[in-house]
Image (cartoon, rainbow, N blue to C red):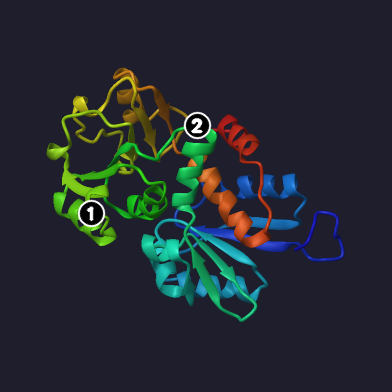
Amino acid sequence: MSSLFDFDAKPDAYAVMGNPISHSKSPLIHTEFASQTQQRLNYSAIQVDAGGFEQAVGNFRASGGKGLNITVPFKQEAWEFVDERNELAVQAGAVNTISFNDNGQCVGDNTDGIGLVRDLIDNHAIELTGKRILILGAGGAVRGVLGPMLAQQPSEIVIANRTEEKALALANEFNRGDQLRGCGFPSIDDQPFDLIINGTAASLQGELPPIPAIAISKNTCCYDMMYGKEPTVFMVWASEHDASKVLNGLGMLVEQAAESFFIWRGVRADTREVIASVTAGL
């Protein structure tokens, strides 16, 4: 590990790979982490063309790179590519963090679920243990967070998806009995949940999943895994239904980055000031 004051050493190189990538906040986030913790490193964003992922990783590693973050659309390909996967990466079926160990192997991690849980619990004081949770969507984003969410021992997680079969298959894959079940949107319970998480991409299209109004009450927290300068359609819906808290996924982004940073550098950054900084820059 090199500090900011070890000027004889070349700064360690890290990067995020994806396509598109120009919008990524990761270079800003990790640069702030490095400054805060006195780590001497460079972090860049690399756009990778379809079919070029393995070569891009090989080139980065050959140039002395120390670690990578992986974003869409390469998280599943990264899972296939790495030599080893930790338990959360196995559960998620996707890798968003790659480390190169001393044995010359690529090790894959997934920090998305940890990022979500830390944002909910540490930044927003939202209790998960013993709570009823509704998660909208059954794609990669949702699968990536289920392991850490289940580890908090909620009383129940319901995965609701437009295609019911996908929600049922995902719930069955984790095999948690009554603690986790899947359904289609029309079959969402007719009683309020403690927490509703939007894990669909609907917000990117300005669309709202068909959520029954009965699912939300004044005691329900609503969290959109997407984020932007303006509230998402889901967040507007939650506010209109008097949710107790309405949150976006920017904190999750910073918290998952902090876990990657810890995996690489062995130090933990103060995420709150970075969340504030990134929010101000939206």
Q: Looking at the image, is 152 positioned above or below residue 109?
A: above
Which residue is under mark 2?
A: 124
Q: CA distance from mark 1 to mark 2?
A: 29 Å
Q: Looking at the image, is 84 positioned above or below residue 263?
A: below
Left/right of residue 106 with respect to residue 202 in the rendered view: right
- What amino acid type is highlighted by mark number 1? Gly
Quarter of the rendering containing residue 239: top left
| Quarter of the figure with the N terminus | bottom right
The circle drawn on residue 177 is 1
Residue 7 picture location, percent across and down: 86, 60
* Disc 1 versus disc 2: nearer the observer: 1
- What amino acid type is highlighted by mark number 2? His
Dot 2 alpha-carbon crowd within 10 angstroms: few under 14, some 14 to 19, many 20 or more: few
Quarter of the rendering containing residue 238: top left
Q: Looking at the image, is 244 positioned above or below residue 87?
A: above
Instruction: Give the residue displayed 27% in from the left and 26% down from the top.
Output: 216
**Residue 250 appears in the picture as rendered:** no
| Quarter of the figure with the C terminus | top right
The circle drawn on residue 2 is none
Left/right of residue 126 with respect to residue 122 in the rendered view: left
Instruction: Give the residue displayed 49% in from the left and 38% down from the top.
Output: 121
- Relative to the observer, which residue lies in front, 119 or 33? 119
Instruction: Give the residue displayed 49% in from the left and 47% down from the top.
Output: 115
